[in-house]
Each structure stands twice: as C-alpha cells, then as structure tokens.
Amino acid sequence: MAAGAASGGSATTDTYREARTWLLLPSWLILAGLSLIPVCLMLIYSFLTKEFRGGVIWDFSLAAYDQFFFDRGLFGDDPAQIEWTYIAIFWRSIWQASAATLLSLAIGFPTAYFIATRPERNRAIWVFLITIPYWVNLLIRTVSMKFLLRDQGPLNDMLIGIGLIDTPIHIVNTNFAVQLGLFYSYLPFMVLPIYAAVERYNFSLSEAAADLYASKFTTLRRILLPAVKPGVVAGCILVFVPSLGSFLAPDLLGGAKNFMIGSLIEEQFKGNAGNWPFGAAASMILLTIVLILLLIFARQQARAEKEAH
Amino acid sequence: MFGSKRRFDIKSYPGFLPVTLLCLVILYAPLLVVTVYSFNASKSITIWEGMSLRWYVDVFVGPESEKFKVAAWNSFVIAIIAASVATTVATLAATGMIRAGKFKLRGLSFGLISLPLMVPEIVTAVATLIFFNAIAFERGLMTILLAHTAFCIPFAYLPISARMQGIEDSYEQAALDLYATKRQAFTKILLPLMAPGIISGFLLAFIVSLDDFIITNFVKGAGVETLPTAIFGAVKQGIKPNIMAISTMLLAVSIVMVTVSYFVSKSDNTK
C-alpha cells in the first residue's frame, strides 16, 4: 500500500485516452467536495469565533489557537503564559502512539520475518490470518479487548486459576491498556510492509555474510536490517499516524485520566459545551503533525528507492 | 569449511516462531473470548453458567431489539449504497488512471483519491461535519451516506487498480482490431476481466462503511443510529451479554466477507 501510494502506480496504456476526463470526473467531484473542500473549510473555521451552543460566528479570530497555546487567566487580561494542558494532551498522545508503535514493531517484525521465510505457497494464508482481525469492526475489537482485560475478566481469571497471581492485575484504565488497544488496532499495518520488504530481500547477502563468519545476530543487524529499513519505517508510520488521532482505544480502554487528542477533539463537537473553532484548530494541529511525518516518510522512501537503483 | 554445509540455517532465528504464535494469540484471543461469552446463559458477564442462545434471542425479540433492528437496517442500507457508488467511481477512476495514458494531473488525482487514507479519520470526521454545517445541510442518514461514499473510494480503488495493472491490454487491443468500439472493449472485455478486483473492492468498501464509527458519530443527526454508534452508546453503560451477541454476529459477517474477498481476488480469470 505504502510503496504504491508513493509512486502512484506503474506504467499505463492509453486505450481510453479520449474518455479520461469523464472517467475521472466522478472521483474528482466526490473527493474534492467531501474531502478536500471540508479540510479547507476546517482551516477557515479554526480562525472563526465560537458560538456558545455549538457552531461558529463568521468573525475572524485567533482565539482558538490562543486558547491552545496561551493561558491568560480567568478573565483573559493576565499576562500570557504558556498553557500546558493541551500541549500535555498532545505530548501524551505522541508518547502513547510511540509506545504502541514500538510494541507493534517488537511483535510485528519477527512475525513479518517469519511469514516471509515460509514456503511461498503458505505465505498468503499466514498474511490472511494476520489481516482478518483488522477487518473486524474496530469498536468490537476494542470492546473485546476491554472485556478480556477487565479485573474480573477471563485473563485475570485464568492467571488466578493457574496460580500465577493472587489478586487481579489492573490493566483497564492504564496507559498500557491504551497501548495494547492501539497495538491491536493497527498491527497489520506494521506486519504487511515489513513482510513485503523481507520477501524482496535477497538472502544470498545473508549467506555471503555467514560464509565470512558473521554471526547470526551480526548478519541480522548489519545486513538484513539496513536492507529492509524502508519497510520498517513504512510500518512505523502506518501504525503511528492512526494511533496518534485514535479515539476508541483511549476512550474505552484508557478512561478519563488517559485523555488523548481524539477525545479532546471529539469533546468540542458534542453537545452545547463544545467549542468548534477550538476543535478545528486542534484538528489542524494534528493534521499538520501527520502531514509533516508523511512528507518525511515520502522523502525517505524516495531516497531508499534511488539507492536501490 | 569451503563448500561444506553452513553451520546454521541463516534464514531462521530462534524465538521468531513463538513471537508469531503470540501475535496470533493476541489478535484472536479477545474475539474468541467474546464469541464464547456471547453464548453464556448467565445474566452476568463474569460468571459462566453454560451454553445458551438466550442473548441471541434477546437481540431479536428483547426490549432493545427495535433499536438494534433500526440501527442494523440503517447500517446495511448505507453500506450497500456507499459501497456500490464508491466501487463504480473507483472503477472508472482506475480506468482513467491506468488505461488512459499519462497526463499532467495524474499525480494530483492519485493524491486526491488517497486523501481519505492520509488524513486521520477524526480529522476527516471534523472536516465533514464542518462542511455540512457550513452549507447548512441537515444532519441525518443522508450525511452519513455521503461521508461514507467519499471515505470508501480509496478502499475500493486499491484492489481494483491492483487488478487492472495485472491485466495486459492485449485483450482489449484484440477486440479493437476486430472492430469493437472502445465502449464495447471496456464493457465486454475489461470489466469482465476486472470482476474479481471489483468484487473484492466492493466487499472491502462495504466492510469499511459497515464498521465506521468515528465519522458516523460526527455527522449523524440526533437520534439517527447505525449499528456501531448504537453499540458504542450501549457499551458506555457497561458491556452487556446482548452486546456480545450482536458483536459476534457482526464479527461473523466481517470475517465471511473478508474471506470471500480473499478467495475471489485470488481466483484468476485471465488464464
């Protein structure tokens, strides 16, 4: 997915050249109308004035960004200080998404490698097994995770039953539960690009290293890892980006103490207490972070492609 | 040493198999547990009191059945329409991208098609809500349908374009040489060859629409529910056995559809 997305697909033929505009027009209209224009409108809304019962007043204002970054006291006339509340929420989200990415990498890399080194006819089945859960409703998966991890849930029951622990471990409503939930949500995104990279890897390089008395670990570290790095980076980005803005895992598994960006944004649009310009501003800041990451990623992939040729 | 067998198998690392198995356990354990407990006879979700279909009956005739029936119907209708439109649009777009020569806006078109995949889902949700608010479009089933259609296009596009790239254009060229019109080459040659890609694109788009919570939650009107938003509302009051029964059914639908999609896309009708 990532590799194809970067290059835009392979060579084309021109059988339907005359019809091109008509073929592409529906997708242009729908996606410009329901994806591109809305994002531009969101940018505009983030510079408007909030209406007290949800919605906006069409007056230019920097209040949303000001509220995000600065604390001006209860009445707004104190000298501006840095407001840490929202920065802290973003920081926690970045931290949680990073931890989830590392967890996915720690489990996803060996899994992807293992699958890629199976006999060719078995690989598709392994990949299929890893991807099935991804297509199950994310909400249901997250609820299932919560059910499994509860204090009185089957996991704790089992651990107590086999005598490993005496009292239930509290997992739900901790940072770790959120990380586990995010890991569970996006693991296939880690496995698939690494799998693709290892599958393309030429194992005679490893064999050459081994013939020259490199240990297995050295071969892995010095030969294999550099060769499959683009796949690893792609996997990390593909897990990190959706984790950063996720809503369900932190909401259901994290509880109120483990608030993340997604919940902060959602709150601004629910009911009358919300603040639409502030929600739009928070979304813009999230989108900016994500786009910067994707840009770095695209450049890195382009460089890797150049080196390969 | 020269020419002799290597001291070890360079491809395999100890511990990678156990990690893979652990990975599968983590992926499937929560789903299995919920499936098993959905058959629990007990009113409590903690105590196991033997097998029963009681909660499945409850879903269809119980006190909340009306709510879930309406939500399920909404989800189903939206998913069918959104996936059909998205698949049609994606098929045309793929033809325009892959079978209509090089053109200046190709990169831009591709960026537009993959936009919903790059923007975080919650941002798409916020942006779509703001859009409907700005044009004063009343929120309800229609807003959900429109948002889903746009969001499903890239998911339908990926398998469809992958398939189209794998089909040589010699089949269509042969038809054109035999005086078929381009329209005939498209509908009688390319589309039938594309069938597996189109079906698997449709199924993926269908699942994406059926599963969506975040965007739906933002753009749905008050009182309008789809299955995921109804489930979310119920789960907020605690996980109840009837929710596990609904979840298990939805889980089964997704798994069946993905499996069908997998085998359809594997079948090769160009040989």
Image (cartoon, grey):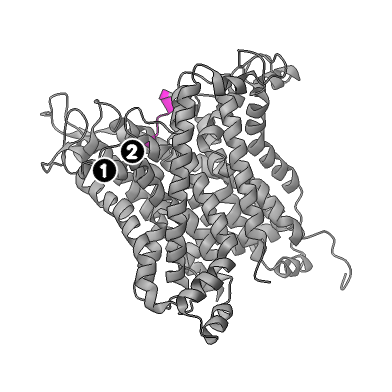
Measuring 20% from the left and 28% from the top, which residue is drawn there? A53
Residue B219, label in figure: 2
**Lateral position of residue A177 relative to residue B42, left or right:** left
Range shown magenta: A256-262
Whether residues under marks 1 and 2 lie with C-beta atoms below 8 angstroms apart, the answer is yes
Residue A229, x across and y down, in percent: 57, 60
Up-down relation of residue B173 to residue B84 (above or below): below
Q: Quadrant of residue B27?
A: top right
Q: In which quarter of the image is residue A223?
A: bottom right
- Relative depth, front residue between A128 and B242: B242
The quarter of the rendered structure image containing the N terminus of chain B is bottom right
Up-down relation of residue B83 to residue B193 (above or below): above
- Relative depth, front residue between A118 and B255: B255
Secondary structure state at the residue bearing disc 2: helix
Measuring 31% from the left and 59% from the top, which residue is drawn there? A29
The residue identified by callout 1 is: B132
Up-down relation of residue B185 to residue A241 (above or below): below
User: Does A259 appear in magenta?
Assistant: yes
Q: Mark 1 lies on which chain?
A: B
Looking at the rendered structure, the number of numbered marks drawn on it comes to: 2
Secondary structure state at the residue bearing disc 1: helix
Q: Mark 2 lies on which chain?
A: B
Residue B127, x across and y down, in percent: 30, 45
Measuring 66% from the left and 67% from the top, which residue is drawn there? B269
**Looking at numbered disc 2 in the image, what kind of residue is underneath it?**
Val
- Give the main secondary structure, helix, strand or loop, of the magenta stretch: helix
**Looking at numbered disc 1 in the image, what kind of residue is underneath it?**
Phe
Disc 2: CA contacts within 10 A as few (<14), some (14-19) or many (>=20): many
